Amino acid sequence: MNLSLCALQPNEEAVVLELPKEERIANRLREMGLLPGTTIVFVRRAPLGDPLEIRLRGYSLSLRQNEAASILVKKREA
């Protein structure tokens, strides 16, 4: 099932399918290692819901809620 990154729950794994359409944001995410095909783990959401923390390629990355909402992912089955 394909969904936005912000719809994941803590400790869920997913594979990135599509980055945001806005090129400026997509380029910034690519520079940080978030590419289509990358496996990520959703770590947690801040108490007020923003930002979100994900783990990828051996490091943690915080994203704004609106950025995460525009990243399409597919959950990995256990």
Image: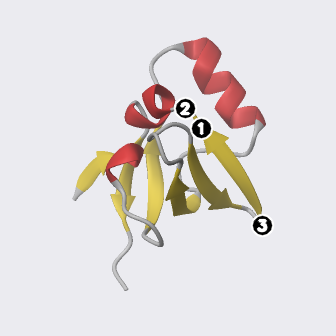
Q: Secondary structure at mark 3?
A: loop
Tell which residue pokes out farthest to the bottom in this image: 78
Q: Residue at x 40, y 30 (%)?
A: 70
Disc count in the image?
Answer: 3
Q: Residues within 10 Å of mark 2 (few under 14, many from 20)?
A: some
35 left or right, relative to 61: left
Task: Please state which amino acid type lies under the numbered disc 1.
Answer: Leu
Q: Residues within 10 Å of mark 3 (few under 14, many from 20)?
A: few
- Frontmost of labels 1 and 3 is 1
61 left or right, relative to 16: right
Tell which residue pokes out farthest to the left in this image: 1
| Precedes in sequence: disc 3 or disc 2 | 3
Q: Residues within 10 Å of mark 1 (few under 14, many from 20)?
A: some
Q: Residue at x 77, y 66 (%)?
A: 58
Q: In whole angstroms, how far apart are the C-alphas of marks 1 and 3?
A: 16 Å
Residue that label 1 marks: 63
Task: Please state which amino acid type lies under the numbered disc 2.
Answer: Arg
Task: Please state which amino acid type lies under the numbered disc 3.
Answer: Gly
Which quadrant of the rendered structure holds the C terminus? bottom left
49 left or right, relative to 62: left
Residue that label 3 marks: 58
Disc 2 vs disc 1: Cβ atoms closer than 8 Å?
Answer: yes
Q: Quadrant of residue 43?
A: bottom right
Can you give x and y, in whole percent of width and height, for residue 65 in the image? Answer: 46, 33
Q: Secondary structure at mark 1?
A: strand
Q: Quadrant of residue 54?
A: bottom right
Q: Secondary structure at mark 2?
A: loop
Can you give x and y, in whole percent of width and height, for residue 73 in the image? Answer: 39, 50
Q: In whole angstroms, how far apart are the C-alphas of marks 2 and 1?
A: 4 Å
- Frontmost of labels 3 and 2 is 2
Q: Residue at x 73, y 45 (%)?
A: 33
Residue that label 2 marks: 64
